[in-house]
Image (cartoon, rainbow, N blue to C red):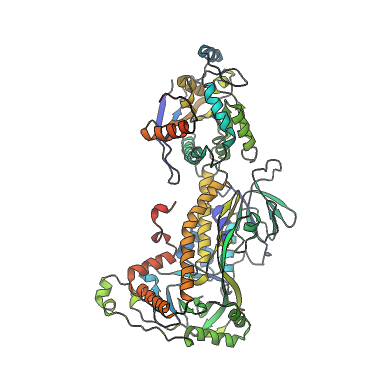
Amino acid sequence: MVGAAVGCGLATNKLTKSLRVAIIDGKPLTEGLYNLPKIDGVPDPRVSALTPSTVKFLEEMDAWRYISNCRHAPFDSMQVWDYTGLGYTRYNATDVGKHELGYVVENKVILSALYHRIQDLGFTSLIFPANVKAVKGCEKSSSARVKEGTDCETNNKGLAQVELDDGQLLHARLVVGADGGSSKVRTMVGLQSFKKSYEQEALVCTLETSSTHSRAWQRFLPTGPVAILPMGGTFSNIVWSTTPSQAHDLKNMSDEDFVAKVNEALVGSFGPFPSSHIPHLLASPLGSFLGVTSSSREPFEPPPHITKCLSKRASFPLSLAHAYKYATDHVVLVGDAAHTVHPLAGQGVNLGFGDAATLVNILCEGVEVGADIGEVSLLERYEKKQRLTNLPMMAIMDGFQRAFSVDLGPINFARAAAFRAVQFFSPLKRQVISYAMGEGATLIPKNFQL
Amino acid sequence: MLRSIVKRRLRMPLCHRRTNAALCTINVSASTDHTLPAQSSRQAASEQGRRFVSEDSASPSISAAEMSKFSALAETWWDSRGPFKALHLMNPARISFIRSVLCKHFRKDTCCARPLKGLHILDVGCGGGLLCEPLARLGARVVGIDAVEKNIKVAAAHAVKDPLTASIKYLCTTSDKLVGEGYEQFDAVISLEVIEHVTEPKMFVESLAGLTKADGSIIISTINRSISGYFLAIVAAEHLLQWEAELGL
């Protein structure tokens, strides 16, 4: 998705639309990739929660309208609590004066929308399916995005070289590695990455709830968070991060057993519901005069009851990873190829889209001054900017993951205090919401932004 | 002789440091005659009597000491972290200015990747080609000249690596010689960070004018005459790095 977003961004910008771009994807071209999925039918379990910042990027590329004509589910509030029942936090979009906190969209819808937009713009040279065999003489790979430089054979010394498994040799000014967490492009060009496995897997599935809702629910269990995201109507998506063995059991049990387990995880197990005691000051009219968020005065609500499992269950391992360098001569990494993060806040793909937006801007700046777009000093400007955005977010997500995986009295109380602090202290809550929505400037001083 | 001189303070994008350079554009008007007769140019050369190390005959503009200094540094031109790091950092700002000025003068569309298409540009004192290559990528037909042969070789070797820059023509010569030979005239003649090194600036500018078409443009840059300019560009860069022996400043 992030690779396609880079292509789409380049295609929609006046300065870069004359670049010749090749998108190489090892997955076979599925029929209907250019046809947007129908709105009826069960949603695919692979979804992304897009922040308003990402939606703005998609709107700027005019790709969002394809998604908005297709299935997408806005959510306007979020409730987070843990298994101890000592505290909870509710976030509403109205706390920051917005209508939505984000949108839940199937990955195939996002991808189709981007390809649709690229095609509508007449952007040339889409090559797929193909696998990248080598980038500058390295080993086999799965997928990469390549910007073609030229067909001329003699003057290619300053260009990157990409060899496909069908024997074709491409020369490009810039190779964009957007091939995911286990990026072969990254390995082939020798870019090292820090990686820490969380010893957890995330299980995803589409469920049916007893009633419609437009709220994201997340309960932290000792084994990891279980999250329910609305998908429109009574469809919901579950992301359950847990131990590999439990993930395996959950994947293989019957649908009915699985539904029972999910309801137990959300409601039936561990501690009680958190108490909804709201301090008098906040509940009183003085509270609203002082600018207390509306969500601070809302009691805890139990999550929706799950009635059916509607799709296959799939799981993927979770890890924290960050490349030491995002770029080298004529090669740059975006998205999961550069960094992966725990899905507990749904930020991973949004960081990737942020990478795409910044890379497109930097390349435009390069084209504007006639620079070689594969020049490492230009790519390092992209890296510098994205590190400032990505690293704090990753550190915070990692911090949450650690804080919630410890079952110890003092830590539990500390977490409860933190829940209550965010729930009742409105300025802090607004900061948290703004940051999570992708308005990153609230946590990063403006003078560091390039 | 030259109708209007427009001086602008360099406006730096946030991502580049202040470089204390001053860029000046001179728009050549149609009514003035800029072609110096070949005879007078050769006379000027012999009258000055200064010689420098070169394959061809001497030019009055540049001293021998100047050129041998730059020869030593030619190979490191393209290392963006090397001795010419400041030039590399400054380059986007210079190109941005040149692009905007030329687009305005020649009424070109700035919102495209190759706005300088159709323009014939001469870079006088091109060094390793730091200016020529971006201009070629922006669509111009570029000729780069430098009095130091090694620079020309470095520039040519680097330019051939990218198909978009392989068409740049590099010549080891000086502007006065080109005028003397009656070389073709250009839409724009650009000379960045050179005039401070020539011994006869007036003659140098006259030679630039001689190579510019009627209604063309001349762009010159040099170090700002300010205290910070002195310390940063003269003392630090040129004295400490020994880029220049004597300037008299």
- Please tell me whether residue A86 is drawn above or below residue B195 in the rendered image: below
Q: Is residue A276 above or below residue A290?
A: below
Q: Residue at x 67, y 64 (%)?
A: A27
The residue under the point 61% across, 83% down is A249
Judging depth in this view, the residue of A134 and B211 nearest the camera is A134
**Res A246 seen here:** yes
Give residue B242's position: percent from left, percent from top: 49, 30
Please tell me which residue is depicted at 52% across the width and 58% down the height of the picture. A355
Q: Vertically, is B96 above or below B122?
A: below
Q: In the rendering, at what x and y percent does residue B9 appear?
A: 39, 36
Q: Position of residue B143 (x, y in %)?
A: 59, 30
Residue A307 locus on image (x, y percent): 53, 86
Q: How many marks?
A: 0
From the viewer's side, name the closer residue of B200 and A210. Answer: B200
In the displayed structure, does residue A212 sit left or right of residue B71? left
Q: Nearer the viewer, residue B98 or A408?
A: A408
Instruction: Name the side, left or right, on which A156 lies relative to A405.
Output: right
The answer to whether residue A89 is seen in the rendering is no
